[in-house]
Image (cartoon, rainbow, N blue to C red):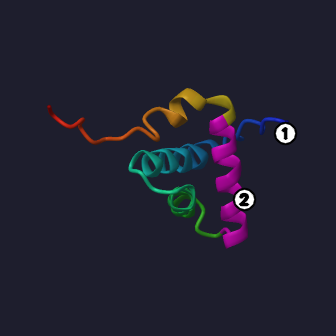
Amino acid sequence: MPEAPPPPTAERRPAWRAAAVAYRQARRDGTSHGAAMDAAERSLREHWPELSADEVSAEAVAAIAYASSHHPAWLWDGVGRSMRKPDAF
């Protein structure tokens, strides 16, 4: 099993948190992993507009990996559940 990613530096923490929040919300809204990663990358781009596409992608992967490893209950809460109300009898 791969090693859990290290915690973000103080400089990265706000951007990684924003990326994780964007990813989580997108997944809660029912989007695919790819679309949720796009949301995370857009969020990171707001913090670091100077990063290249490859750098933004790497930061998004690291942010989501960290959140998934260190805060899984928070990240996955509400993801994958149907938001539809059960059919009435």
Dividing the picture into quadrants, the one containing residue 86 is top left
Percent of width and height locating residue 27: 47, 48
Q: Nearer the viewer, residue 22 or 36?
A: 36
* Residue 57 inside the magenta-drawn segment: yes
Residue 69 left/right relative to 21? right
Q: Nearer the viewer, residue 32 or 69?
A: 32
First of labels 2, 1 by sequence position: 1
In the displayed structure, would residue 9 be above or below residue 71?
below
* Residue 82 inside the magenta-drawn segment: no
Tag 2, which secondary structure? helix
Tell me the number on the disc at residue 2: 1
Going by the numbered disc 1, the residue's amino acid type is: Pro
Tag 1, which secondary structure? loop
Q: What residue is at 58 percent from the left and 68 percent from the top?
A: 49
Residue carrying label 2: 58
In the displayed structure, would residue 37 be above or below residue 69?
below
Dividing the picture into quadrants, the one containing residue 52 is bottom right
Q: Which residues are magenta?
A: 51-68
Residue 52 appears in the rendering: no
